[in-house]
Amino acid sequence: MSSSRLLSTSLTAGRSAVPGVVGGRGIYLELADGRHVIDASNTAAPLGHAHPEVVEALRGQLDVPALNEGWGWTPRVDAAEQLLGTAFAGEESWVGAVRFFLSGSEANDAILSLAQALTGRAPLATRERAYHGGSGLAREMTVQPHWHGGLTFATGGVRPVPRLAEVLQLPMPVGARVRGESRPLPDADTLAEPLGRAAAVLLDYSQGGAYHDPAYQDLVARVARDQGALWVADEVVTGMGRTGGWFAFQHGSARPDAVVLGKPLAAGAMPAAAVVLSKDLVDRLRGASWQSYSTFRSHPLMMPAILAHLKISARDGLPERARQLDAVMERRLSALAEAHPSVSRVDGRGLHWTVELHGPDWHDWRGEEPEPLASRVAARALEAGSLIATSGEATSLFLAPPLISSDDDLARIVDALDHGLELADDELRDTTPALPGTSCAH
């Protein structure tokens, strides 16, 4: 893209894998050069782009007033009831209430502040390699090294910003469904000390390529309860069906004190997020005011987009569709990993998968390379017709196609990544001459 006075950032380091987009419909984006490519890494667009029912729902509400969340607006009540009645169906025994926000970062910041107020504790806990947002306490809980909120120079390394809170890191739950090494569960004693000091523990289900199994969630939840810390499920990426079922936490038996929703809540048509509180937390708020205010939070235009998304996802069975396509993705990515020695680990659930390459360890890499290997692989995949992102890391790519994708669409995405990985194999072969040639058939 040509240079301009617009400042921006990207999930993908460097320029070659960051295209200019001029439009989008369904699972495809239209690029400035006229090509149409599959949008294969966009967790904010579970229905693809410009879904006609979502567009129509918004078009019919464009004359709404600009109301802050302090004034009553009946469609907000309707959206809250539909969210709980549809996405949280079967969870009525513990779900209490909803508050809408503008973004996952804002929602995480708000619930963490609330946890500090309720418990009287200041420290917060998350797991290694977590990402929870880019502002306030959400930024503090983002412990992926390069997403620290400061500056990363191509030469000269990192210039961090001062921390606002003490953040305690729990062992990262590493899994490898397709390739790589897994890490065993930590023992309860390892978790007890940090959780005994923390106001809350915030767990996500995909960031940094960590898709932990239900046993990890349930262990952390049990120790947190024993130690007096709140457990918050960060479903900003995985909520609304991404990993099969409406939410990732539902694969375990424990239930959180709060659930944070973000990116896909309004199907990407409007900025939207929410915090869903348990009945226990709602009871603890009685007689108190959760006094944090925002001009555009819970904007009236969010509501028709949220309602349309809930209607479409439930009617078309999209969470269950992601569950069914889980086996398709596992099979295709198994063939991909077998064909490419540059792949070190593959893990994922439903329609969110991470492919890690051999290269710099994530503990040490801070974004020093202007065009790291993963970005160059993504650029080559884009040449083959699929836009794949990298989480900004040197060796990590993730796949998150729309939930409306067909089996053939998924095949085209994996084929494009296959094309991109040939570059990584060549570079690895240059440093390890004994490696054999590669080929991949899907």
Image (spheres, helix red, strand yellow):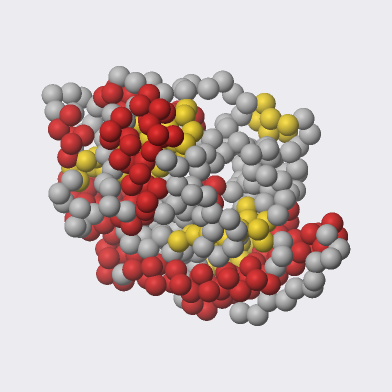
Q: Is residue 280 above or below residue 166?
A: below
Image position, residue 255 (x, y; %): 26, 46
Q: Is residue 329 left or right of residue 414?
A: left
Front one among 63 and 13: 13
Left or right: 121, with 441 as reference point:
left
Please tell me how many numbered marks the rendered image carries: 0
Between 192 and 404, the residue placed more toward the observer is 192
Provide residue 55's location: percent of width, then percent of height.
Answer: 37, 61
In which image quadrant can residue 117 be found? top left
- Residue 245, by quadrant, is bottom left
| Residue name at image x 65 percent, y 80 percent | 441
x 72%, y 76%: residue: 439
Image quarter hosting the C terminus: bottom right
Give whichever of 205, 8 is nearer the camera: 205
Q: Position of residue 356 (x, y in %)?
A: 63, 56
Name the residue: 28% across, 29% down: 228
When asked about the image quadrant of residue 87, the answer is bottom left
